[in-house]
Amino acid sequence: MSEEEDRLSTADPVMYFDLGSPYAYLALASAESVLGVRPELRPVLLGAIFARRGFGSWAHTQARDGRIAEIEERARRFGLPPLRWPAGWPGNGLMAMRCATWAGEQGRGEAFARAVFDRQFVDGADIEDLDVLLECASDAGLDVQSLSAALRRPALKESLRQATERAWDEGVRGVPTVRIGDALFYGDEQLELAADVLRGEL
C-alpha cells in the first residue's frame, strides 16, 4: 500500500449533508453500519451548491416520480419506515440548516439531524416550520431557547455560509458526500466504495 493509500484508508470519514435531502437521510441511516465508524457530519446549504454548480434538484424535473419511487424502495430495503413526503417538498431548508449548524456546534449535530430526518420523511412534517425544528432540537437534548436566540445572530448565518463555501472548495457538488482524506464519494450508493477505501481495499 502506498503512503497516499494508507493516509486515505486511515482518515476519519466526513459526511456533508443537507436536511432536505432524502438521499442524505438514507446515507445517515446506514453510514455507521457500512463504514464501520460514525462519520463526522458537516451541514451545508444545498441550495447554495445548486446555485454554484448551475443546476438544481431532480425534484423539479420529470425525473421526480421515478426518483421518489427509487428512494422509497431503498428505504424498504434498508428496513426504514415507509416514507411520507411533506406537502410541497422540497421546501426552503435555510432555517433548518442554520439549526443543524448550531446543533453541531453544541455537539448534538447527529442527534438533531436524525430527529429532523425522521420528522420530515417518516412523519411528513414541514421543516420550514420553526416549531417543528424546535421540537426536534428538544428531542435531541438541545435547549430550544438558546437555539431561538442563536437564529437571530448573524454569526450563525455566517457559519453556515462559510461551511458551504469550504465544502465547495473541497469539491462537494451535492449531498450526501463522504470525504476520506482528499477522496470524495457522492451519493448514498457510494458508501460501500468509501468503506473499501477505509479498509484499505482500494
Image (cartoon, rainbow, N blue to C red):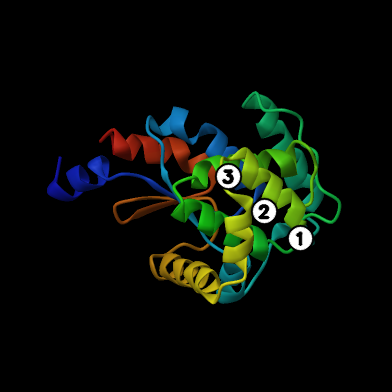
Q: Residue at x 37, y 33 (%)?
A: 37
Q: Which residue is mark 1?
A: 91
Q: Secondary structure at mark 3?
A: helix
What residue occupies the far front of the structure in this picture?
Answer: 145
At label 3, the amino acid type is Phe
Q: Residue at x 72, y 28 (%)?
A: 81
Among the two numbered marks 3 and 1 on one chain, the one whose residue lies closer to the N terminus: 1
What residue occupies the far right of the structure in this picture?
Answer: 87
**Cβ atoms at labels 1 and 2 below 8 Å apart:** yes
Quarter occupied by residue 78: top right
Q: Secondary structure at mark 1?
A: loop
- Measured along the vertical axis of the image, is residue 197 above or below residue 48? above
At label 1, the amino acid type is Gly
Discs 3/2, front:
3
- Measured along the vertical axis of the image, is residue 7 above or below residue 36? below
Discs 3/1, front:
3
Q: Position of residue 139 (x, y in %)?
A: 63, 38
Q: Residue at x 46, y 51 (%)?
A: 106
Q: CA distance from mark 3 to mark 2?
A: 13 Å
Residue 58 appears in the rendering:
yes
Q: Residues within 10 Å of mark 3 (few under 14, many from 20)?
A: many
Between residues 12 and 114, which one lies in front from this camera angle? 114
The number of callouts visible is 3
Q: Position of residue 186 (x, y in %)?
A: 49, 51
Q: Which residue is mark 2?
A: 20
Q: CA distance from mark 1 to mark 2?
A: 8 Å
Q: Residues within 10 Å of mark 1 (few under 14, many from 20)?
A: few
Q: Secondary structure at mark 2?
A: loop
Q: CA distance from mark 3 to mark 1?
A: 19 Å
Q: Which residue is mark 3?
A: 112
